[in-house]
Image: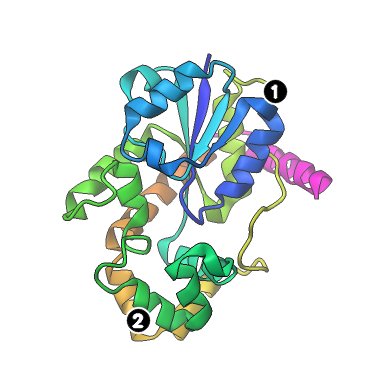
Amino acid sequence: MNILLHAHLFKNAGSTLDWSLRRNFGDGFLDHRDDTLLRDNPQALAALVNDNPQLRALSSHWLPLPLAPELAAKATLLVLLRHPIDRARSVYQFERGQADAAGPSAAQAKRFSFRDFIAWRLEEGRGPVLRNYQVRYLSGDFHASDPEALLPRAKAQLDAACFGIVEHYDESMILFEQSLRAVHPAIDLAAPPQNVSRPGNSALEQRLAEIGGELGTVGDRLIAENQLDLALYEWAQQEFDSRLAAVEDRVERLADMRSRIRGLA
């Protein structure tokens, strides 16, 4: 038995992947929301899986990494990585659309412009949601006081996972399906986009230029606070391109994937 474990990083297209996991596995999929239970507790996750043998896939915003050895032996880790500066815009738009009772970040997003919200989030004591968030998560030491040592651990975790790039979501699902069909031969990861905060399909370069124009010097601070995430993203993009290039029929697979997505829209 192989169980899929989705490390649902906040604002990294995780809702779309969860949609397709639920479509494939039905009651065998668990969208786990008890963050307190799993946070920094690999043994709790292993016990949860062992106590629920019907599970085929599980998603959590706080998947504890690295996985407990007994669980890692029978699990496949799924991860989607996103450009950290583009992600910052999505965090703002998501929080701005939250209900009033959703917490201080949602309240400040409604009150502030994008620039002022980012400046507020980067103040000391605001938490690392926009400070090397992906490296922290994947390293398994989210609240590390010295994150510089975390990048090699995050790379190793990502390298061992089935990972994709949010900005290349359809291509990522091609790689996911190819990797998973040995243990899940009927898997179909086509899905219409879910929980999208930013409409439109502008290129990443254009979005980054727009963000830089809006943020001004605050954008320089945001980049400085995400040097590790930027390094991880650059490394992951190169690895992703290499893995995708190894798929000989990738053009046909991509066309098929997009056809399946259109059929679900």
Prevailing secondary structure class for the magenta stretch in the rendered image: helix
Task: Identify which amino acid the numbered label 2 is placed on.
Answer: Val
> Residue at left 67%, top 38%?
20
Q: Which mark is residue 120?
A: none
Report if residue 209 is visible in the image.
no
Q: Which circle's residue, 1 or 2, is located before the other in the chain?
A: 1
> Residue at left 83%, top 44%?
263
Element on which disc 2 rests: helix
Residue wearing tag 2: 218
**What is the span of residues highlighted in magenta in the rendered image?**
247-265
Q: Is residue 57 above or below residue 11?
A: above
Side of 248 where 76 appears, left or right:
left
Task: Identify which amino acid the numbered label 1 is placed on.
Answer: Ala
Mark 1 closeness class: few <14, some 14–19, many ≥20 residues within 10 Å = few
Residue toward you, 35 or 213: 35
List x then y, in percent, for residue 143. Answer: 25, 52
Residue wearing tag 1: 186
Magenta span includes 125: no
